[in-house]
């Protein structure tokens, strides 16, 4: 039985039991509430039991509907001492540090070859930031780290986090992927997990106790060469690496879903409650 159904009818049973206790205190019985005059005693007992069952079922169904609606609004949990809230939203509307995944070269060439116009990286460059400002910010960070250009580009380590202030808010650009010679973002599970740990550490270095909002990192164009991950598996990997990183952000962390599977993922997280408890 699914957890949401089990919880619904457990709550329903508790509710009916409470009503029964109140009725007993008041001296009321099912026979007095439903006299059913004209029915023989066995039939009357059967009808009263059926009424009680229907009430129990309807209350359970109502509670289940309420739980589904509440879950669809978001799911909160504690990961390694960090408060994490998972919901559906547009990251560019968040009042927080907005974490945007980019490649290790922090490029600004949005041409649907190197960077997709529809990606968060592409939207940051075209709609929310300024390519020249981003390039200047990246250059300053490269100088700080002692990184020099190779073939006209800087090449940072995976997991590097660089803060960038645009007109509409503050961003943390993170090097999630390394492009190959065909400009494809490829990785493997081990490398991806290590990158996520470094990203969490980079966010910890920058956030200054302000709220942080992230997409599900790796759910876009990233290709896993060994074992492909769907959005939910990628989200779970993010949560596990937050716990493993031992980072403790003294602020709210919001992970944003933005796909057709959002409702399914939020309900699945509710079902995986016991598994997620192990990440506290």
Image (cartoon, rainbow, N blue to C red):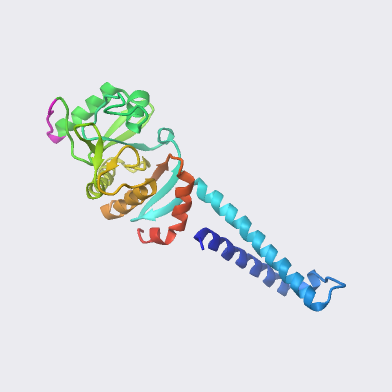
Between 58 and 149, which is closer to the camera in this rendering? 58
- Where residue 203 appears, x then y in whole percent? 29, 42
In the orientation shown, which residue stands out farthest toward the top?
A: 132
* Residue 28 visible in the current orientation: no
Is 50 on the left or on the right of 181, as rendered?
A: right
The picture places residue 65, in percent across and down from the top left corner, at: 59, 53
Q: Nearer the viewer, residue 135 or 71?
A: 71
Give residue 123's position: percent from left, percent from top.
Answer: 36, 28
What residue do we see at 39% from left, 60% from top?
Answer: 275
* Horizontal arrangement in the rendering, residue 11 relative to residue 243 (left or right): right
106 or 22, nearer to the observer: 106
Q: Is residue 149 magenta?
A: yes
Left or right relative to 272: residue 126? left
Q: Look at the picture and state if 219 lies above or below 242.
A: above
Residue at the spot 36% in from the left edge and 43% down from the top edge? 216
> Residue, x 80% and y 72% (percent of image)?
32
Q: Where does the magenta region start and end?
A: 145-151
Residue 214: name its quadrant. Answer: top left
Residue 158 in percent (x, y) is at 21, 41
278 to 186, vertically: above or below: below
* Main secondary structure along the magenta-highlighted residues: loop
- For residue 167, above or below residue 75: above
Which residue in the rendered view is the most extreme toward the right?
38
Tell me if residue 93 is in the magenta stretch: no
Name the residue at 35% across, 58% down.
279
- Exactly how many numbered labels are in the figure? 0
On-image quarter of the C terminus: bottom left
- Residue located farthest toward the bottom when viewing the structure as drawn: 41
Whether residue 125 is visible = yes
């Amino acid at each position: 039985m699914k957890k949401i159904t089990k919880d619904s009818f457990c709550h329903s049973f508790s509710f009916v039991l409470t009503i029964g206790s109140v009725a007993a205190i008041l001296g009321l019985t099912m026979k007095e509430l439903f006299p059913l005059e004209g029915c023989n005693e066995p039939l009357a007992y059967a009808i009263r039991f059926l009424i009680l069952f229907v009430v129990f079922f309807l209350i359970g169904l109502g509670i289940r509907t309420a739980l589904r609606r509440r879950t669809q609004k978001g799911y909160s949990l504690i990961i390694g001492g960090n408060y994490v809230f998972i919901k559906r939203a547009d990251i560019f509307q968040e009042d927080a540090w907005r974490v945007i995944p980019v490649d290790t070269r922090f490029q600004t060439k949005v041409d649907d070859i190197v960077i997709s116009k529809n990606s968060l990286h592409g939207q940051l460059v075209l709609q929310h930031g300024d390519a020249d400002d981003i390039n200047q910010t990246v250059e300053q960070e490269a100088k700080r780290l002692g990184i020099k250009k190779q073939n006209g580009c800087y090449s940072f380590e995976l997991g590097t986090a660089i803060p960038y202030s645009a007109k509409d808010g503050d961003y943390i650009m993170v090097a999630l992927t390394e492009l190959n010679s065909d400009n494809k973002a490829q990785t493997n599970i081990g490398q991806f997990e290590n990158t996520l740990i470094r990203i969490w550490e980079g966010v910890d270095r920058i956030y200054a106790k302000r709220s942080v909002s992230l997409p599900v990192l790796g759910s876009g164009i990233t290709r896993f060469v060994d074992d492909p991950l769907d959005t939910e598996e990628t989200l779970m990997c993010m949560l596990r690496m937050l716990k493993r990183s031992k980072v403790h952000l003294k602020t709210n962390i919001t992970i944003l879903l933005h796909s057709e599977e959002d409702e399914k993922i939020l309900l699945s997280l509710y079902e995986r409650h016991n598994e997620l408890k192990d990440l506290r």
